[in-house]
Image (spheres, coloured by chain):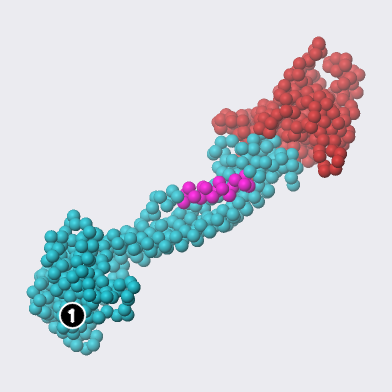
Chain colours: A red, B cyan
Amino acid sequence: MIGGLVMKKKFDTPITGTRRKNDYVISTKDIVKSFYTGTPNELEILHGMTFNVPRGQFVSIVGQSGSGKSTLMNIIGALDRPTSGEYFLDGTDVSRATDKELSAIRNKQIGFVFQTFNLIARTSALKNIELPMLYSGVPPKERRERARQLLETVEMSDRAGHMPNELSGGQKQRIAIARAMANDPDIILADEPTGALDSKTGRMVMDLFHKLHREQGKTIVLITHNNELAAETDRIITISDGNIISDSAESTDSKSLDSKSADSEGQVNEKEAAE
Amino acid sequence: MGFFENISVALAGLKSNKMRAFLTMLGIIIGISSVIAISTLGSIMNASVMDIFNSQGGSNLVGFQIRMKQDRARDYYYSEDLITIDMINDVGERFADDIDAVALYSNSSSGSMLLRHKEYDVSLNGVNPGYIKQSMSKVVAGRWISDKDCEQNRSTCVISDKMAKKVFGSERGAIGKNISVTLRDGRMLDFTVVGVYQEQLSAMMQAMVNMMGEDWSGDTYIPYSVMNREIDGAVDDTFFYFYINTKSGVDATTFCEKVKSYMNNSYYRENDAVEIYYQTAESQMAMMDEVMGILQLAISVIAGISLLVGGIGVMNIMLVSVTERTREIGVRKAMGAPNSAIRMQFIVESIIICLIGGVIGILLGIALGNLAGLIVGTMAPPSLNSIILAVGFSMAIGIFFGYYPANRAAKLDPIEALRYE
């Protein structure tokens, strides 16, 4: 399908002066998330995270379980609001959005891909892909057509009428990816998308992400604890105990986005790309 | 999400769990079907009562009868309490302008008749000339009982066409023939057939006749005076009741009030226990309605309880459905479904359960009502109002009992819902 990885940035933005917020699809500043647990002290999961993701970047967020990456994912995915700090998604202030606005943001700006696929049972592949469009008011005919196109993109056209329980894990995940693409979101947020798949089908799913990234310029946020998968992406943000402990873009950002020579992760990627 | 998507999602959910859906609907089905059955039966009873009235001269027919005064009831009537033929003649003359005919019916007596070694059942009924006007029967050969027959105690009789054919071969052939009727007590009476009538029965009567079987060959009518004197052994003609066919255009109730107060003042003033009262088609209909009303109320209470229980069942199953589909709700929310869409989805599902239950209930109710109607001999479509009410009511149950579970689904935290196992 996709032989190697072409490490080419599609959205290289020259760093001249200060960037406007919209230049970043994701822009966070001092994100803190704490939960009130009943004890006098609140439980703080995220201790102030600041990072930006430019449009078209394939970024992975890596961390062990309990590191706070799920909490971070919920906030990036507009499923939750930060306790304090700012989060702009393509210029939309998510941290101050109402529940209804959050729904609209999730609907139009975010495409979720889950570890356990989360297709709706007893609903055909095609109908599953149509789901986000149901909530954005796309007319039925257009919806159907778009869903068919997406099926083609994920090479599943022959499975349009199949129910989720008639599909293999890899097929389910491809349908889920097509569904995530339905409303042409700003970002695709993939939470351990290969976690429930064997290595071969996992590879196919990763290749599909690369294809979407390369051919359609999608911004993809991959949440994983698998360093090998993370190494395939443009940038790795590693978090631990609610803090960012390393960000492969930090070094490049300070020099040039094109310069990869000093980037150890970049070298890994190029090595893989050459294979 | 559009309304139709909600419906197809709801139907898909129900299809996957048919047994559960059916059991949930059962309460609604029982409730709605009993309401529809009783209202169908109500219209059948009404139609059948109307049928009887129409066959008896319709709303022009009124009846007068003696009854005990409410606060001074005796156990039995004395002979002086009865209505005499003189009283009836007096009323007939006094109110002649309003009266078309007076119908008298004294008594009936059964016996049998032996002819050419064959025995036939005979039912004798004492009537006057006016009696035929309040029935839908018509004379097809010869004549009806006349005034002279009654005044002179002539042993004449009028038989049904069915009997004429059975016994004498034809209607005409029966005229002038003599029949000997042996009464139950062994006495034998001779009658001359003067006429043959064709019976027109109301549907209800027809059904009763059908149940009696082939042997039934209709009533035989004789003069009331013959019945009273020859058979009952009375010295004069007295009656418990009589009918009047008013002229068209006469208001039945006003007429009856006049006749009632006249008779009570003239003949029953001295009587401390008995009085005259009347029945019109309307008053009988009202009585019928009252009985139906009580029956309807009783069934409605049962139906109401059944619907309440059914509604709680729907709520219960919707709560189960919400719990079962927590993850689906989480996914839908992650895909951008606002709370309102989730709420709507589950309310629509609840409405659909109740509506399907309601429709099954309506069909079952119509079937049950008409099954009962089959016995009475009249079929009737259920009233449109009750169907609209039933549909509306089942939708209301769906909304009312579906709202709480739907709201619970709508308010689920998407993160928690997605994590739900």
User: In screen coordinates, is A253 left or right of A139?
Assistant: right
* The quadrant where residue B6 appears: top right
- Is residue B111 visible in the rendered structure shown here? yes
Which residue is rendered at x = 65% and y = 51% of the image?
B320
In the rendered image of this protein, does residue B194 appear above or below residue A234? Answer: below
User: In screen coordinates, is A140 left or right of A42?
Assistant: left
Look at the image and say whether residue B235 sits in the magenta stretch. no
In the rendered image of this protein, does residue A116 appear above or below residue B286? Answer: above
Look at the image and say whether residue B402 sits in the magenta stretch. yes
In the rendered image of this protein, does residue B178 appear above or below residue A159? Answer: below
* The quadrant where residue A241 appears: top right
In the rendered image of this protein, does residue B144 appear above or below residue A13? Answer: below
* The quadrant where residue B413 appears: top right
- Read off the residue under disc 1: B228
- Is residue B136 visible in the rendered structure shown here? no
Disc 1 marks which amino acid?
Asn
Q: Position of residue B293 (x, y in %)?
A: 40, 60
Which residue is rendered at x = 85% and y = 15% of the image?
A256
Which residue is rendered at x = 55% and y = 56% of the image?
B308
User: In screen coordinates, is A15 left or right of B230?
Assistant: right
Q: Position of residue B313 (x, y in %)?
A: 59, 55
Q: Residue furthest front?
A: B270
User: In screen coordinates, is A44 left or right of A208?
Assistant: right
Which residue is rendered at x = 81% and y = 33% of the image?
A33
Q: Position of residue B42 (x, y in %)?
A: 38, 59
Give the residues drawn in magenta, as a range: B390-406
Query: Looking at the magenta stretch, what is its main secondary structure?
Result: helix
